[in-house]
Amino acid sequence: MFREGFRRKIQLSAFILCYTIRHERKNMQAINNNKQHARSEFSAALNQVCAERGIKPEAVLESIQAALLAAYRKDADKTEEEIVDFKATVDPVTGAANILDDKGKDITPAGFGRIAAQAAKQIILQRNREAEKDAIISDFQNKIGTIINGMVLRFEGKIAVIDLGRAQTWLPPEEQSPEEYYRLNQRLTVYVKEIRDTPRGPRIIVSRNDPRLVNALFAREVPEIANGAVIIKNVARDPGKRTKIAVDSTEEGVDPVGSCVGQKGVRVQAVTNQLNGEKIDIIPFNKDLREFIKAALSPADGLIITLDEKNKRAKVIAAEDQQAIAIGRGGQNVRLASALTGWEIDIVGADKIPLTETAETKTVKTTKKETKTKKPDIKPDK
């Protein structure tokens, strides 16, 4: 009886021991699986983020190490001089973080893993934003000189922030049209002018008053300009008020002015609508400077022009009823014509110019002939 009881105790102890060993093996396997999962999860996430955003893993790890040192300095209440030789390490496989002092001793505080994880998360998010911003800037580097549609998102002082979908651009006061008033959610076509370095980083600058905006709008509306049959020689613009554009044809039989105007004026009207009613004068380019200047000063007519090629200065003689038309309101017409042709233009009334100064009129000077009169012979009376 005693032996039977002893045998049962031995069997029970062996069973408990086997169960314990088996359970411990399962626990160790679970721990190893968790470690492997953590290891694969950290490295996979790091590599995925770096691949998607175009960031090198080494750069991210360096940023995390710098953040860990900053977090340790704050947590341990130390100065930068005290930790100048300290070093943070991050395992690229498991993500384990450690702080080493100037002698290489591990001084990682208890519970520092949570701080390390938070620092790593912030650094990766920051790197993501910076990488995405750099990608957008690089993309818009190829769009400089083009037009794009956007919407007024908000105002930062006098700067209008235009939302273009992927990016936000700046419309500063010097690039705004003085005759336009912008409002939230207003849709605009803007000219991508440049990428400007600012204290807050690179900014995409767009414009509404650049003359090249008119070029791009006509290129979008006129197929002949897009395929090169019609070319824009020059543009002179008073933003929001009036624009003069000189066009020429590269192919015979193509009317450059008619192509830009369109049937019943639909093409030029589409550009005018984009510029909020800005008046547009389309002028045919002419190699004859006199004829080109006459056309640029339209609607004034009957003009007489003399050229001073040395000083690139043109004197324009206008009749009394055409003088005000040639000059325009506030000098706008002559100012735009001068910018379009590249010549300084002086408008002079015909009544103030001697006839001999006109270029297309010849005068004949007559001189008085001196005549000698003979005295009659008078014979004295005898």
Image (cartoon, rainbow, N blue to C red):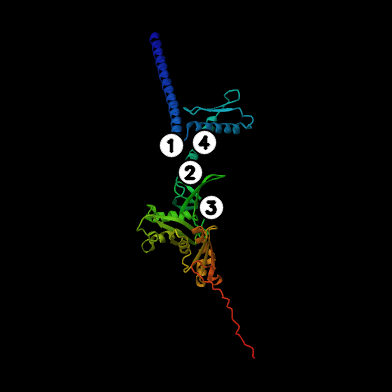
Name the spot of residue 49 as percent of width and height, x first.
Answer: 45, 35
Q: Can residue 109 be seen in this view?
A: no
Numbered disc 4: secondary structure? helix
Circle on res. 137:
2
Q: What amino acid type should be assigned to the residue bearing mark 3? A: Pro
Outermost residue, front direction? 382
Query: Compared with residue 329, is residue 3 higher up or lower down, i.e. above or below?
Result: above
Numbered tag placed on residue 172 in the rendering: 3
- Secondary structure under tag 2 reads helix
Q: Between marks 1 and 2, how big is the CA–CA gap?
A: 17 Å
Write the residue at 50% across / 32% down: 59
* Label 3 – label 2 distance at C-alpha: 18 Å
Give the foreground label among 1 and 4. Answer: 1
Label 1 and label 4: CA atoms lie apart by: 16 Å
Which circle, 4 or 3, is nearer the viewer? 3
Please give the residue where the numbered disc 1 appears in the rendered image: 52
The tag earlier along the polypeptide, 1 or 2, is: 1
Identify which amino acid the numbered label 4 is placed on. Answer: Ile
The circle on residue 123 is: 4
At horizontal 49% and vertical 50% (from top left) the residue drawn is: 193
Q: Distance between the residues labelled 1 and 3?
A: 33 Å
Give the class, few, some or many, for how many residues have Cα within 10 Å of label 4's Cα (few <14, many ≥20): many
Marked residue nearer the N-terminal end (4 or 3)? 4
Instruction: Tell which circle, 1 or 4, labels the residue nearer the N-terminal end.
Output: 1
Residue 6 location in percent, x, y? 41, 10
Query: Are dots 4 and 3 in contact, CB under 8 Å?
Result: no
Q: On the rendered image, what quadrant is the N terminus found in? A: top left
Residues at circles 3 and 2 in contact by the CB criterion of under 8 Å: no
Instruction: Give the secondary structure at mark 3.
Output: loop
